Image: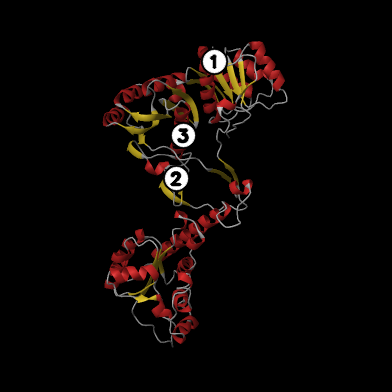
Amino acid sequence: MPSGLIKRKSVMRALLSVWDKTGLVDFASALKKLGYELVASGGTASALRDANIAHLDVADVTNSPEMLGGRVKTLHPKIHGGILADRSKEQHLKDLIDNNIEAIDLVVCNLYPFSSNPSVELIDIGGPTMVRAAAKNHEYVGILTNPSQYGEVIDELTANGSLSPATRHRLARAAFAHTATYDAAIVTWFDQGGVIGGAPNATDAIVPESLHLSFERADIVRYGENPHQVGARYRRSGSSPWWDGVVKHAGSALSYLNLFDADAAWRLVHELSADAAGAPAVAIIKHANASGAAVGVSLVDAFAKALAADPQSAFGGIVAVGGRLEADLAETIAAGPQADVIIASSMSNEAIATLITRRKATRLLSAPAPEPLGLSVRTFGDTALVQNADELIVRPSEWRCVSERQPTDQEMQDLIIAWRVCARTTSNAIVIAKDGVAVGVGAGQQSRVVAAGIATTKAGDLARGAAASSDAFFPFADGLEALTSAGVVAVVQPGGSVRDADVIAAANAAGIVLMMTGERHFRH
């Protein structure tokens, strides 16, 4: 403290103003035992009063009553002067003395739960102001914004009598993150038309003029895409994505690609099951693309069919089981190629025991259903590409049959599976399906003809009498001819090429079904 100034009184002061009152009474009691003088506002003061904890109301400090229905209570120099005073500056200390302001050493504040019920009245003003003021002056003030911080702060105050610079720095960082998340939620509400007269146009509702996303770290993963990279899983602040509900029964820590591929597999198996009116479905994913996917009469049947489509590529992949994994399926999986991850809605104890014994390195996950994808954000450097999630909007009942031959019921079912898997396969993509099984997948090719060649090669003899899908139109008839020459009898594609007539003519010449969806599904 600079010389020549009267020292402030030795008692420490804490300001408490919280919406979430979890742990408040115990925390306030602990502060009192440590000798803190408490100042509280509004509902926080009421809670302390009900618990018979001595404190000053904010109005006792400011000599100003709350007004405007509580909108103004802490916005006062006697509050913010006490928070913001830089105690290394002589003029600041003199200002405190001249204005009879007590310094505040600890601020405990969390904000109105705006996201729970967005409205103008839940836009907090005084709270963010106190939080930011305390965080700015963290060299002298501790700022707590979450009840989870109470225990560690009390422990440190009890042990040392004060908070260390490192702790105050960490708490300040969390405080600015707290207000940033809060402001992001308000901006998003504005973008979604939550304000009177503020309804955005259709484009701005999806891609607003500025994007304010707030994510919190949920897990540090084993490593990134490669072992030399650091990786983590984040969740949108305030959300509970399906990954938060995952239970890992066995196996080592998950890597970045384990999560990426497992997410792709889990979403695909749910889509396949939904398309087939809840029928048992299994998907086997390698590098975010299906090596095999099937709908069967049972999960054991679906797995066997999905594996048979490409057993070589299944090694080291992700097995997604659209239901409960029982002992019989565990035995079947254990007899097949090593899987990096097996994910199911639940697993019996017998199934877990079998897989732990037979597949020690495999991560075993039980998971809830995935939430909708929502906004897609891809970054590179300081640039981001943003779009809404790719959904299959056009229903199969709305597809156009442009060929002379109409599809049979079985062909139509296979076309639907091929189309679904193709939409979730890296472009350029061709998928061949037969009897409810994706038997040939050509993914990530620069040439659609090459993708068709890969798909037919993988399908082999199963291509005869099968259905196929292309994620984008055939620019020439050669891509379709590569499929028909292998025995494919039905094809679905978006259409829209200037040479659609040539492709339709090729389909009619081969005597196959050709459907057009009018909807492209590139995936990069």
Crowd band around label 3 with a 10 angstrom C-alpha radius: few (<14), some (14–19), many (20+): some
Task: Give x and y (percent) for residue 401.
Answer: 62, 20
- Residue 267: mark in rendering: 3
N-terminal label among 2 and 3: 2
Q: Residue at x 51, y 55 (%)?
A: 185
Quadrant occupied by the C terminus:
top right
Front position in the image: 323 or 120: 120
Residue that label 2 marks: 233
Identity of the amino acid at label 3?
Arg
Crowd band around label 1 with a 10 angstrom C-alpha radius: few (<14), some (14–19), many (20+): few
Q: What is the distance, in whole Å, between disc 2 and disc 3 at their CAs?
A: 17 Å
Identity of the amino acid at label 1?
Thr
Quadrant occupied by the N terminus:
bottom left
Check if mark 2's residue and mark 1's residue have beta carbons within 8 Å: no
Q: What is the distance, in whole Å, between disc 3 and disc 1 at their CAs?
A: 28 Å
- Residue 408: mark in rendering: 1
Task: Give x and y (percent) for residue 255.
Answer: 43, 39
Q: Residue at x 52, y 56 (%)?
A: 184
State the SS at label 1.
loop
Identity of the amino acid at label 2?
Arg
State the SS at label 3.
helix
Residue 237 in sight here: yes
Task: Give x and y (percent) for residue 400.
Answer: 62, 23
Q: Give the image quarter of residue 489.
A: top right
